[in-house]
Each structure stands twice: as C-alpha cells, then as structure tokens.
Amino acid sequence: QMQMQESGPGLVKPSETLSLTCTVSGGPISSSSYSWGWVRQTPGKGLEWIGNIYYTGSAYYNPSLKSRLTLSVDASKNQFSLRLSSMTAADTAVYYCARRNRGFLEWISQYYYYMDVWGKGTTVTVSS
Amino acid sequence: SSELTQDPAVSVALGQTVRITCQGDKIRNFYTSWYQQMPGQAPMLVVYGKNNRPSGIPDRFSGSTSGNTASLTITGAQAEDEADYYCSSRDSSDNHLQVFGGGTKLTVL
C-alpha cells in the first residue's frame, strides 16, 4: 500500500523560501499513470491545489503561485519536492502531498483527475 | 480559471439521505472527485469518476452529475460521516490544472 510523507521546516521567516519534500513508499514514483502533487490548506479555510509534477519532470502550477513555485522530482530517492519563494503570512498553511491518478474520457479524448493517496500533511508557519 | 461553488454547511438527520452539491461552469465536461476531511486529518478520496468508490468507502456514498452541478449523496447518513467535504475537478483552461470547491461542512443531527 502506497504511503506518502511530507518533511520540511515548520517555521519559515517572511521573504524566505520554503522547501518541502514528499517521500513515497510502497510503489515507484516513476509511473506514467500518476503525477505527484501538492495541496495546501490555510487555517480554517479550504483546500488549494498548488501544482503537480510527473516523474519525467513535466510540472504544472497553480497560476496564482506560478511565479514563486518550483516543483522537482528525484526518482532515485522516490521523492518529489516543492520550493515556494518569497513566503508571506498568507502562505501559512498545512501542506499536503498527494498522488494524482487519472481516468480517460473517450468522448472528448481528455483526462480527468483525482487524488487517491495523501500524506498526513505538514504545518508551515511564516513568522519572524 | 474555473471556480467550483459549494454550500458552506449542510445538515442531515441520522439515517436520512443528504446531497452535497458542487457547481461549476465546466463540470459537465469532466468528472468531479469528492474528498472527506475529518478535523485534524488529511483529506480522503470518497468518490471519483462517473461514480466510483475507493476500496473501503461504504456504498452509502455515491456521486452524480447533472449539467453543471455535481452531487455527492450519502444515503443513510451515519454519525461518522460528519466532516468537511470538498469537490474537485479539472480547470477547463488547461489540461493539467485542478481546482477545489470551498468545502461543505456536514452536520449529522
């Protein structure tokens, strides 16, 4: 059974860069069937999709974060990572990593997505 | 980008049926996935695709779509179903982007 675990600092200073890593166990990250993503949840608020990356390195970002965000993958370690620069208090949140699976819609030749395996989340606070 | 709209709160009497809805311009084009989140826990997938449930999810959970509204139905709600529920779908503007609804807090009375 696949498991995912986030790791990284719990406290980041304003203007600094957040680096988080998600370690995947129970299966290879190098599968073309899945992409690997990040979702965050600010205190008392809903879920926000951050971005996803395939093991090939192709990455897709939330437009609202794109200018500050970099996703990367290390298949040799079965890990993928997030870097979010210029952190502010608004970035204080619980950050989750998740596996994104997909199904194919034959009538429009498009994929739909769903996140079927989640990490437990890591709390990141931005404060001086 | 697309937006998905959910009612902030819904309540249901124990054992009754409840429908949680998710509205969005492009929902008719792509299947919606649904996630249950208990307090202090990570979200958990409960319904995806046309109407599929991951292993271990009770069959009282079902999904459907009508026009631009997706619905998660819980038939015979149990006390343990009290949680926040989020819908998610593709962003129509890009093949790979994804959006979440604002979430619905379900109270089982």
Image (tube, coloured by chain):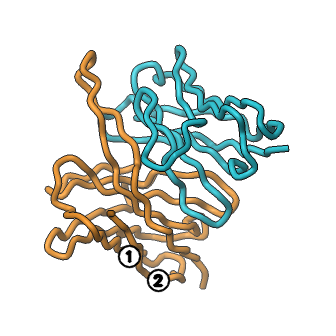
Chain colours: A orange, B cyan
Residue at horizontal 16%, vertical 60%? Answer: A30
Q: In which quarter of the image is the N terminus of chain B?
A: top left
Residue at horizontal 18%, vertical 58%? Answer: A55
User: Which is more N-terminal, label 1 or label 2?
Assistant: 2
Assess whether mark 1 and mark 2 are in contact (beta carbons under 8 angstroms): yes
Estimate how packed mark 2 is, as few (under 14), some (14 to 19) or many (20 or more) residues with alpha carbons within 10 Å: few
Residue at horizontal 77%, vertical 32%? Answer: B16
Residue at horizontal 27%, vertical 15%? Answer: A107
Point out residue A27 in the picture as x, y percentages from the top left corner. 23, 64
Give the camera-side residue of A54 and A30: A30
Point out residue A84 in the picture as x, y percentages from the top left corner. 40, 67
Q: Are marks 2 and 1 on the same chain?
A: yes
Residue identified by numbered label 2: A9
Helix, strand or loop at mark 2: loop
- Give me the chain letter of mark 2: A
Q: In which quarter of the image is residue B11?
A: top right
**Amino acid type, residue under disc 2 in the picture:** Pro
Helix, strand or loop at mark 1: strand
Q: In this view, does B88 lie to the left or right of A7?
A: right
Count of marks overlaid on the render: 2
Q: In which quarter of the image is residue B9?
A: top right
- Give me the chain letter of mark 1: A
Point out residue A44 in the picture as x, y percentages from the top left corner. 70, 59
Residue identified by numbered label 1: A19
**Amino acid type, residue under disc 1 in the picture:** Ser
